[in-house]
Image (cartoon, grey):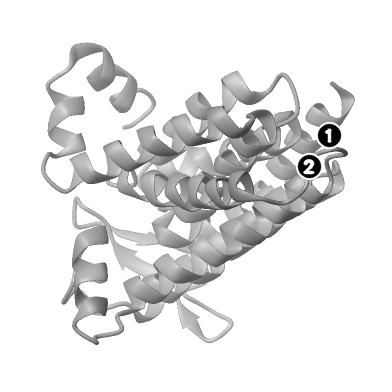
């Protein structure tokens, strides 16, 4: 329990401090972090970097190097799409389709990069477990982490939505082996959710991919081979469904989900 509290507290403090430092700066490290949100208002993407760094620091401090690595991996490749991406191809199917035609989009690089960082994170997890060598279940675990990173990004369409989804997914994972990673994800959420709900900042791919990846790590740490496979199948089904249906329409047409989605906004 102490390690979970430490992870959450450090992640919350670090992400909040980083957010406060960078939220008024348009250019950081040579990159323009100012964007326009769905409502047409100027916002900062720096929230995503603050979230990823905070979650990584919290996870590493409390003993989850896999969680820290996944957060940074998701953030790096998410930032590539945020700052250098194009809109010619959209969605998982669009980017993979372009790849089969010999067109390498930034989205395709992100998919492959997050897949690789997810696999490395799964290797770190399984190599740290006595009696569980690296094997096919590790490959499934890597795919689960990457799939979780991608799914979280699909929720980042309204203020606070992706962060709420991260916290809700992380709560059941707090007990058990994935508790530290889950606590880091939730702590970082608490650190940045205020300006996100007020429509002053947004996660972008940088933060949403990082958030989903850390939750994915928590799930892989918690689950055995069968559980990983079932969870990966569920993530795949949701991702494929997102190509045909709008999550926003489903949320806004379901009273409980709509109220939860709007909670805390202006």
Report the number of discs: 2
Q: Nearer the viewer, residue 46 or 143?
A: 143
Residue sitting at x 18%, y 72%: 89
The numbered disc on residue 6 is 1
- The answer to whether one can see residue 263 in this image is yes
Q: Are marks 1 and 2 in contact (CB under 8 Å)?
A: yes
Q: Is residue 160 visible?
A: no
Q: Where does residue 18 sit, x and y in percent of width and height? A: 66, 57
User: Quadrant of the rendered structure where residue 8 is?
Assistant: top right
Q: Position of residue 154 (x, y in %)?
A: 31, 47
For residue 10, the mark is 2
Could you tell whether 250 is left or right of 175 in the image? Answer: left
Indicate the secondary structure of the residue bearing disc 1: helix
Query: Please, what secondary structure does the residue beneath circle 2 have?
Result: helix
Percent coordinates x, y for residue 218 in the rendering: 64, 36
Q: The N terminus is located in which quarter?
A: top right
């Amino acid at each position: 329990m102490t390690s979970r509290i430490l992870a959450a507290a450090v992640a919350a403090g670090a992400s909040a401090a980083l957010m406060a430092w960078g939220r008024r700066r348009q250019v950081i490290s040579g990159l323009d972090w100012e964007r326009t949100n769905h409502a047409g208002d100027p916002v900062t993407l720096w929230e995503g970097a603050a979230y990823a760094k905070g979650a990584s620091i919290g996870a590493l401090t409390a003993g989850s190097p896999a969680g820290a690595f996944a957060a940074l991996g998701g953030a790096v490749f998410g930032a590539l799409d945020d700052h250098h991406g194009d809109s010619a191809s959209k969605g998982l199917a669009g980017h993979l389709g372009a790849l089969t035609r010999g067109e390498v989009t930034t989205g395709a690089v992100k998919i492959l990069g997050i897949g690789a960082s997810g696999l490395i994170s799964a290797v770190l997890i399984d190599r740290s477990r006595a009696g569980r060598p690296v094997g096919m279940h590790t490959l499934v675990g890597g795919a689960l982490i990457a799939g979780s990173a991608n799914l979280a990004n699909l929720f980042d369409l309204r203020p606070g939505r992706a962060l709420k989804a991260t916290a809700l997914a992380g709560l059941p994972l707090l007990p058990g082996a994935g508790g530290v990673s889950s606590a880091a994800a939730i702590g970082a959420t608490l650190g940045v959710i205020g300006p996100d709900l007020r429509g002053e900042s947004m996660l972008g791919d940088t933060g949403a991919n990082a958030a989903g990846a850390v939750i994915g790590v928590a799930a892989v740490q918690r689950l055995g081979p069968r559980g990983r496979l079932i969870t990966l199948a569920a993530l795949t089904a949701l991702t494929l469904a997102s190509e045909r249906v709008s999550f926003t329409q489903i949320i806004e047409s379901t009273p409980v989900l709509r109220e939860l989605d709007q909670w805390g906004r202006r």
